[in-house]
Image: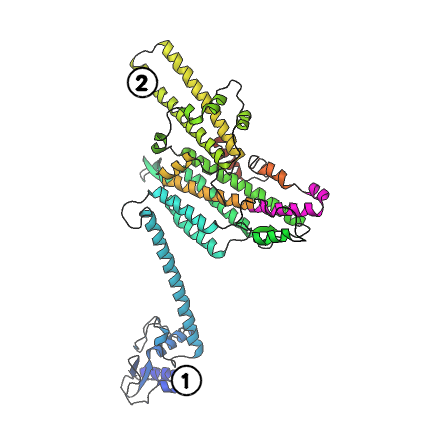
Amino acid sequence: MDRSRSVEEDLVARMRGMLPHSSFSDAGSGRVVGSDDRFEQRSVDGASSSHFSIDEVDTYNGHANEDGTSSSDGSSPLGWPLGRRERSGSEASPAASGPKLQGYSSFMWEEKREKRETELSEVEMMKERFAKLLLGEDMSGGGKGVCTALAISNAITNLSASVFGELWRLEPLAPERRTMWRREMEWLLCVSDHVVELVPSWQTFPDGSSLEVMVSRPRTDLHVNLPALRKLDAMLLDSLENFQETDFWYVDRGIAIAEKDGRNGNRHPVQRQEEKWWLPTPKVPSTGLSEETRKKLQHQRESTSQILKAAMAINGSTLAEMAAPEEYLDSLPKNGKTNLGTTMYTALTSDNFSPEAVLSSLDLSTEHSTLDIANRLESAILVWRRKIHHKSNLNLANAKAHKSSWGLMKDFVGDENKRELIADRAETILLMLKQRFPGLPQTALDMHKIQYNKDVGQSILESYSRVLESLAFNILARVDDVLYADDQARRHLSPASASGRQLSSTQRSEKFGKDGPVGKSLLKDNTKLWSYASNLAESNGLHSPPSRD
């Protein structure tokens, strides 16, 4: 009893030294001071009592816990009712603690509250995204949504448009946009963890016996291509971070035109692509960029070209693996000659067939006409391939039923060989067309494949590679704009010396642009990723990216 009293008196004395005198009542009075937030503590024999607020005890316990003498998480040896530390700061007594402790508690509370609000907002956002995917973008729940594969494809496309839609300058991506891209892509790509395939495997039991069982593993196309796409994604974002401090800057198009019309303005065109009026105009010093900056830009351009080629190869291989939907096949004419037209069909069936001569005879002056030719070639190839496959199966069935005459078999083999030859020639023309115009929009067949695709894994690979392809193309275009401005500045300064110092924009266009194959010369230090992408591109052909800017 005496020991308990001494412990209590010692604690009371320590509390009196820490807290204002008004926080205690007179000893032995037995009167409770304050409102419901205060309580009375008596000694064991009832001889003395002290009055504390709950917040005062909380503050003391927290302070004592830092010194290692007490803990607010455990029970008090005197059985004091401990208040919860989560109580609102507005309910605390102003005299409950010193300014330092009160500020520390307020800071900890605000930090926890902000963290909790951030976590809740991200959770709610994730719930909304997945609810939209599950409902097929039909938030009304009316059952009119699209399939899951198309919903994921649209989600990745829309996310890319919101993050990279206004990539008009060579500058680092805003931190909030970068975080948004990383966070939401992780949400969308986590679906691929559940796209698996079953493979046979041997399981050994403790008694030494073995049994063949089926085990799941990530599907081969996702296991190979998805890590490569993640790497390409990181490389593109890092390339934008390299443009933090540059020797060039941007001005609005109206300001650039006014400077051009001025007395001391430049006399060359203000922009490489005059039709894209919404893009800002890059400006360089009057003497042009430094040699170091120009070399960095050219190196960045070569690296981005390799990224573009890898993304195009993955996108092309994924689209090639997708089956043509029946909705598209039903809309095609039944005759390949009708799809191509008489002029192109005659050129393909000529004995003196030449791919370059056929391309030179076609109207490739506009993007619309070029895309129309690509659509007609794809549809004709598909019709011929289907006829070859269908007649092969039909004649095989007839041969099993009864012996065919040699004349009928000879005619069939001749027609099949002719269709095969024409289809191969048309594929050659289509491949050369896509190589000459790498910025060609997607064809009608590709869009139908994306729209009617039901495979979630293929949808993820196609949409992810497509948005990275578009991002790489835009970065290349912005680098070309700066190099064009530098070429014009050097030519205006010294035409004779500028032409021999660096590669002109016209030569770069012939080597890298639409008039030449993309990535014709690879970097010497190619990694395995580029080797894989190059082999894939050779076997499947380069696929054209969607419209950009």
Magenta span includes 489: yes
Q: How crowded is mark 1: few (under 14 residues within 10 Å), some or many (20 or more)?
A: few
Disc 1 residue type?
Answer: Gly
Residue sitting nearer the eye, 26 or 158 = 158
Q: Name the residue under label 1.
A: 17
Give x and y (percent) for residue 24. Answer: 35, 86
Q: In whole angstroms, how far apart are the C-alphas of marks 2 and 1?
A: 104 Å
Q: What stretch is highlighted in magenta?
A: 478-501
Magenta span main SS: helix
Residue 114 visible at all: yes
Q: Residue at x 33, y 78 (%)?
A: 54
* Sequence order check, earlier mark of 2 and 1: 1
Mark 2 lies on residue: 397
Q: Where is residue 501 in the image (x, y as percent from the top left)?
A: 70, 43
Viewer-nearest of discs 2 and 1? 2
**Does residue 409 lie above or below 463 as drawn?**
above
Say which of 369 and 198 sits in front.
369
Q: Give the residue at x 43% y 33%.
A: 320
Find the residue positioned furthest to the top: 406
Residue shown at the point (38%, 23%) measured from the top left: 387
Residue type beneath disc 2: Ala
Q: Position of residue 82 (x, y in %)?
A: 32, 75
Query: Would residue 328 be found to the left or right of residue 476 on screen?
Result: left
